[in-house]
Structures are given as C-alpha cells and as structure tokens.
Image: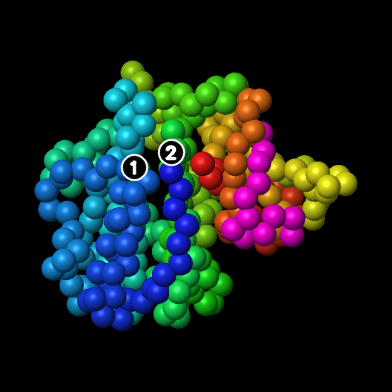
Amino acid sequence: MATESWSTFFSHATDADFRVWGQELNQKLTNIGLVQTTDTGQIDWVTVVKPGALNTDAGFEVWRFNDSLQGTSPIYFKLFFGNGGSLIIPRLRFQFGTGSDGAGSLTGPVGPERVISPTTAFLTPGSFQSFLSHSEGFLALNYKAGAYISGASNFANFVICRSTDVFGQVTGDAAIVYYGSAVASTATIENSQSFKFGTFPFVFSLTKFMSLVPGNENNSNTGTDIQVYAHWMLTPQVRPVFGVGTIFNSEITFGATFTATLVGSQPRTYLSVGTQGNSYWQSATTNTKGLAILWE
C-alpha cells in the first residue's frame, strides 16, 4: 500500500520541538493510509505543550487499520506522547486493541500500555532516519534511528502483522505485535504479543519474538545467496509471520532493500532496520543479526 522514508531534525527541548515531531509522525501515519479515529480528547498539535513533570503524557492519538479485513478483524492502536526521564527526553507509549469507545479508550482484546522509547538515555538533537511501512495486514515503524547514545539507538519502533495461511495470503483470525522492552535505556524491538479474533478473542502472554537461526552461525552466505530466517507467532498454533525476518547485518546493511520468499511462493520486498535487541534468535551473539520489515 505505502512506505515512507525520511530524515528530519529531532529535538524535545521546547514546546515547539514537541509539536514538530508529534505532528510529523501524525502526518506520516496519515500519508500511508491509516485512519485516525474520531475519539474525543485526542492531542491537539497546534496548542499542546510539554508536560511539566517527568515520565508524563501530554496526550494521545487513536489509530486504526484500513485494510480489507478491518471490518471483521479490526486492529486499533493508541499512541501516548510526552516526557521521559528528563524534560528534554521525549517519550512514546503504545497500546493495541480491537476497538475504541469513542472517548479514547481501546476495547476488545486489549494489550498493555507499553513504553516503546528510551526514557533515560541521552538524546542528541539532530537529523535522523525514519521508516514507515503499511500494506495489507501489516504496519511497521522504525523512528529516528540513531537518535540516542548509551546503546539505546532508535527513538521508537513497533510492528503489527496479521496472520497468514501457508500460501502467504493474509488472514483475519490472528495478529502479532512487536514492541520495545519498556526498559529505561532501550527502544529496540524485543517483545511480541499475539492476539486472536473470532468467537473467543484472546490476548496471549508477552514473550520475546521468535526467530530460529540454526547452528552457531555468524553469516549465511552460500556463494552470492543469503538466508533470511522466518519468525513465528503463537495463537496458540505456531504460525509463520510474513512481515518480518531475521538477517545478518554484515550481509544486508541498514536501510537496504532485498526480495525474499518467507511464506508461500511469492517473493516480497523487505527493508533492513538493523539490530533490534535480545530475542529468541537461538544462535550466536545477537548483535550480528538484524530485523527486516516488509517494504511494499
């Protein structure tokens, strides 16, 4: 459906800075085809000011998918904007659900409110790369890569991916969410949580995301060919995830695109977003590996 790639200045020193990055993200989500709901009480980027306290929200936005399955298997998410562990450190929190009550609260099977940005790592103002991808059954944000020092890296990341059948066709019976660890110093995608639609909707327990890299490998090269390793969701059946894969950073650099066939027989285009924390890689050191997101 749509992708967005951009690099812009990022700071949280003043009310004006806060409005700039918040409005920017709002516009990018609109550009790729997501729908902001009409829930009351949402943040006004013209008048909002930064909170006067640490680790505090200034306001929220509620968004929903607009794909062909939204009518029967709705996906909603909520973003909370505010301060982290300093008045000059921004904070972004995230929650997913399957509906909203019209007044800003998510409904249906609802996930936890998670901090998806560093709250204590030092932000260095400057221009930073961001990626946003939305297609049928899929959404991924990689926001302000490299904005932090102290090992925190990106400002914020999350992924939402619907289930698929063995032929790679998107289905509406389940979905998985990837998001940060809520640890004060990191914004890497470390955790995942599946939720199920249907007669008995359910949110499954939070876990590390799962990607099996057999052996103790540090590369996958076979001549000029490379391997992309599949990810899995539990619903409770074990299902492949079509929108993300594991790669070796030495083979596909940050921001590079490539084609791979993770599910079914149709090759699809993916984008490398680099190392994303500790997860169930089942392999050698995690910092040699990166995450790739669907880029179509």
Main SS of the magenta part reads loop
Q: Dot 1, how many residues are within 10 Å of its Cα: few (below 14), some (14-19), or many (20+)?
A: some
> Residue at the right extreme?
223
Residue 35 visible, this orientation: yes
Q: Which residue is mark 1?
A: 33
Residue 274 visible, this orientation: no
For badge 2, the amino acid type reads: Met
Q: Position of residue 178 (x, y in %)?
A: 48, 47
Q: Dot 2 lies on which element?
A: loop
Residue 257 inside the magenta-drawn segment: yes
Q: Residue at x 27, y 62 (%)?
A: 23
Q: Closer to the camera, 55 or 189?
A: 189
Q: Closer to the camera, 165 or 45?
A: 45
Quarter holding residue 47 = bottom left
Query: Which numbered disc covers residue 1?
Result: 2
Q: Closer to the camera, 28 or 87?
A: 28
> Residue at the top extreme?
199
Do residues under tags 1 and 2 come within 8 Å of each other at their CB atoms? yes
Q: Residue at x 79, y 55 (%)?
A: 218
Q: Which residues are magenta?
A: 250-261
Q: Dot 1 lies on which element?
A: loop
Q: Closer to the camera, 275 or 212?
A: 275
